[in-house]
Image (cartoon, rainbow, N blue to C red):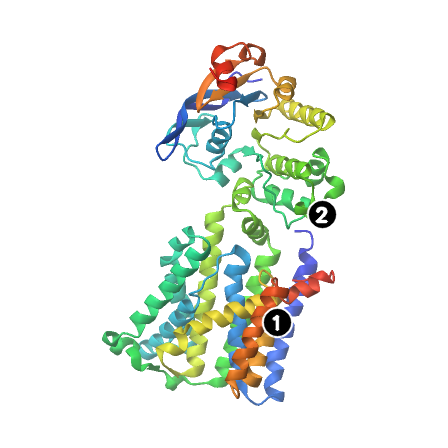
Amino acid sequence: MSSEPLLRLENIEKRFGGLIVLHEQSFSVSAGEILGLVGPNGSGKTTTINVISGVLRANSGRILFEGKEIRNQPIFRIARLGINRSFQVPKCFRAMSARENIEVAATFGAHAPVDVDAILDEIGLLRHAGEPAGSLTVNQQKMLDLGRALATNPRLLLIDEIGAGLNPSELGAIAALLKSLAARGIALIVVEHLLEFLNRITDRVIVLGAGRMLFEGSLAEASRHPDVVAAFIGG
Amino acid sequence: MRNATGGTRYAVAVLATLAVAFVALPQVYGNQSVLFTMMTYMALAQGLNLVYGFTGYLPFGYVGFFGTGAYACSILVTFTGLPVLLCVIGGGLAALLIGLILGPLLRLSGAYFSIANLAASQIIYYVVSNEALKPLTGGPYGIKIDQVFAPTASYAAMLVVLLLTTALAAYFRLSRFGLGLRAMHQNPISAAVAGVNIVRARLVVWLVSATVAGLIGGVYAWNLSVFYPDAVFTLEISVFAIVFALFGGVGTVIGPLLGAGLLYTFYAAIGVSTPQYFQLLYGSLIVFLVLFLPNGLVSLLVRRKLHVL
C-alpha cells in the first residue's frame, strides 16, 4: 500500500440553500485501502460520495485525486480519471441487457480494453448477460451497478450501501469481492449501515453526524466514543 | 456493438428500399407533389426522432428550424445568385446557427424545454413575418423564388435529405455514439458516471437534428418557390412530425418512416377531400395510439420478437 493518499478531501463544505450538510470535511484514502463511512440517516454519507463523484458540487474546499484538484470537474471526467461509484438505489440502464450496461462503461469510461465477460463473471451475472437489466432482482442490479463501475478501470470505488437487503451468504460473497478489489490496489470508500459487514472488510471508519466528522479510527473504538454514541442513540 | 454488422445491413436495406420506392412511385402515381410532401414529413418525423427518440427532448418548436431553413435558402437565392443547392445547404447552416443559439434550452427538461422551444419558434416566425423586414423576407407577404422552380430536381433533393436523415438515425442506433445516447436517455446520471459526456452528446444530437430540419425547409422552399410565412412556420408542421414519429415509434429508424408514410397516405386519401372526417378519424387514431400502442407501430413487431432497427 502506498503511503501517499490517492484521494484527499480538504475542508469540504456542501450546502443545500441555508442548510449545511457537510461541515469542513477532511480525510484521505490510499490505494488498496478500504475506508468505511458510517453514521445515522441524514449524516452526510451519501452526500460525501456524491461530492467526490461529481454528482453534487461542493461549495468550498478541495478534493485532490492523485494530487490534482477535481472539485469542479464534470461527472464523466471524474469517471475517466479513475473514480467510480455504485448507487444506494441501483441506477441501471433498465432497457439494456446486463452486458450492454457493462459495455457502456467499458466503451466510454475505460482507458484500456476491458474484458466484459470477466466483469460479468466477477459480479455473478454472466448467466444473465443477455437479460434486460430491468428484469434482474434488486440485488443483481446492485451488482450490475458495481460491475459498471468496475468496467471503467477505477482506482477509487465509492460503494453506497451495497449490503442492504442481502442475506448472510450474499454479504459474505460481497465482502470477499470488495477485499479482493482492494487487494488489487483499488481504494474503496464504503458507506454502510451494517457494521458487522463493515467490520469484516475494514478497521478504519469515519463516523459522520449531522454532516460533521465525529470520529476516525476503528469500529471498536468508535462504539466507545461518546460523540458517536450520542449521534446514534441521542445524547 | 455486437450486432453492428447485421444492423448495418438492415440500415442499408432500409435506405435502398426508400430510394427505390421514391424513384419508382412517380412512375405509377402521377401526383408528384403528394409524394414530395410525404417525403418532407417522413424526413421531418425522422429529424425530430433524432432528438426526441434518442435524447427524450421533445422539440415542440421543431418547425422553427424548418422555417428558418426555408427562409434562409430563399433569401440566399434572392440576394446571392448562388446555385440553389448551395442555398439549401445555407438553409441547413442557418438552422444550425439557430440551434446553437437555442443550445442553452437543453438545460431545461420535460415540458419546460418543449414550451421554451415552442416560444423560440414563434419568435423566429414573428421576426421573419414582420413588415419591417419586407425588403429581406417579404414580411407577411411571403417570398418568391420562382426563378429556381424545379419540381423534379427538388423532389430528388428531398429524397437525398430523407436518406441522409435516415442514415443519421441508423448511425445513432448502431454506433458507439448511439450506445452512449441510449444509456443517456435511460439514465443520464448513470451514463455520466459510465463516462459519457452527456452535455456534448445532447448538443451534438440537437444541432444535427436542427441542421436536418433546415435542409428539409430549404428543399421545401425550393419546391414551393412561392410561400407565405405561415406555410413554413405553422405549428401544424411540428404537430404532424411529432404524431407521425410517435405513431411509428420513436428511438427507431423505421418507426418514423412507417408512421409518416402511413398517416400521410391516410391524410392524402381523405384529408384533402373531406377534412372534417379526417380530423375526426385522426383524433380517434391518436387516442387509440396513446391507449393501445404507446410505443408506436414498431412495438407490434417487437412483441413478435422481430428485430427492429
From mark 2 to mark 1, how far is it between C-alphas?
A: 28 Å
Towards the viewer: A45 or A190:
A45
Classify mark 1: residues with Cα within 10 Å, few (<14), some (14-19) or many (20+).
many
Q: Residue furthest front?
A: A234
Q: Which residue is mark 2?
A: A131
State whether residue A190 appears in this view: yes
What is the three-letter code of the residue carrying label 1? Leu
Could you tell me which secondary element the residue under label 2 belongs to?
Answer: loop
Residue B225 is situated, as x and y percent measured from the top left of the image, at: 40, 83
Q: Which residue is mark 1?
A: B258
Question: Which residue is at a point 45% across and 85% down the rendered structure image?
Answer: B150
Residue A212 is situated, as x and y percent measured from the top left of the image, at: 43, 21
Residue A206 is situated, as x and y percent measured from the top left of the image, at: 51, 19
Q: Chain of mark 2?
A: A
Residue B36 is situated, as x and y percent measured from the top left of the image, at: 52, 81
Towards the viewer: A64 or B297:
B297
Count of labels in the image: 2
Task: Look at the numbered discs 2 and 1 and tell me whether their residues touch, using CB distance below 8 Å.
Answer: no
Q: Residue furthest right?
A: A127
The image quarter containing residue B305 is bottom right
Classify mark 2: residues with Cα within 10 Å, few (<14), some (14-19) or many (20+).
some
Q: Residue furthest bottom?
A: B30
What is the three-letter code of the residue carrying label 2? Glu
Could you tell me which secondary element the residue under label 1 belongs to?
Answer: helix
Residue B16: image tag: none
